[in-house]
Image (cartoon, grey):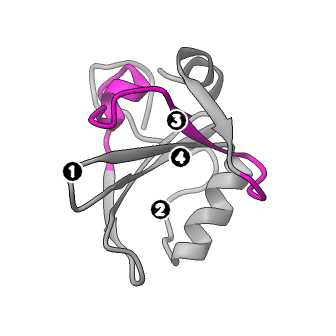
Amino acid sequence: MATFDDIYERYNWQPIRDCPGRYVLRDASKELTVEQVMGVEVSVREFRVDGTPDVVLVAKFPGGGLISFRKPTGVIVHTLNTPDGLARRLARFGIELDGGDEDYWQLPGTGVGK
């Protein structure tokens, strides 16, 4: 199971200005999938959000989650989020996720997860 620290150490993440607990992926292929960034096969939820042409992709894991933005061009921008950063950004989008802080998604047979 991937954790916040595992993913943070694997790539070059830069803090997002004025967004505590949120980091954007730098110096990596813009075609990396959420699963490739996380290093495991996960369940990714897709959302359409008013005010953005991007498809918003969300994957939760222990200690945080990824919010990725698939642009109309196919480019994907990944953001790594602490639990507080994830909650704030999803609330701003009006996205409500099932389950509490301990709820996370990983596909069966790929490790511990719900």
Residue position marked by numbered label 2 in the rendering? 98
Residue position marked by numbered label 1 in the rendering? 74
- Quadrant in the picture for residue 40: top left
Mark 4 and mark 2: Cα distance apart in space: 8 Å
Residue type beneath disc 1: Gly
Secondary structure category for the residue under label 4: loop
Residue 65: image location, x then y, percent: 54, 43
- Quadrant in the picture for residue 31: top left
Q: Kindly give the residue lying farthest to the bottom in the view shown.
A: 50
Residue contact between numbered discs 2 and 3, judged by CB atoms under 8 Å: no
Residue position marked by numbered label 3 in the rendering? 25
Camera-nearest label, 1 or 2:
1
Depth check, front residue: 17 or 36: 17
Residue contact between numbered discs 4 and 2, judged by CB atoms under 8 Å: yes
Q: What segment is highlighted magenta in the picture?
A: 17-44
Residue position marked by numbered label 4 in the rendering? 103
Q: Name which residue lies at 48% across and 27% down.
A: 27
Q: Which mark is residue 12?
A: none
Mark 2 and mark 3: Cα distance apart in space: 26 Å
Residue 110: image location, x then y, percent: 32, 19
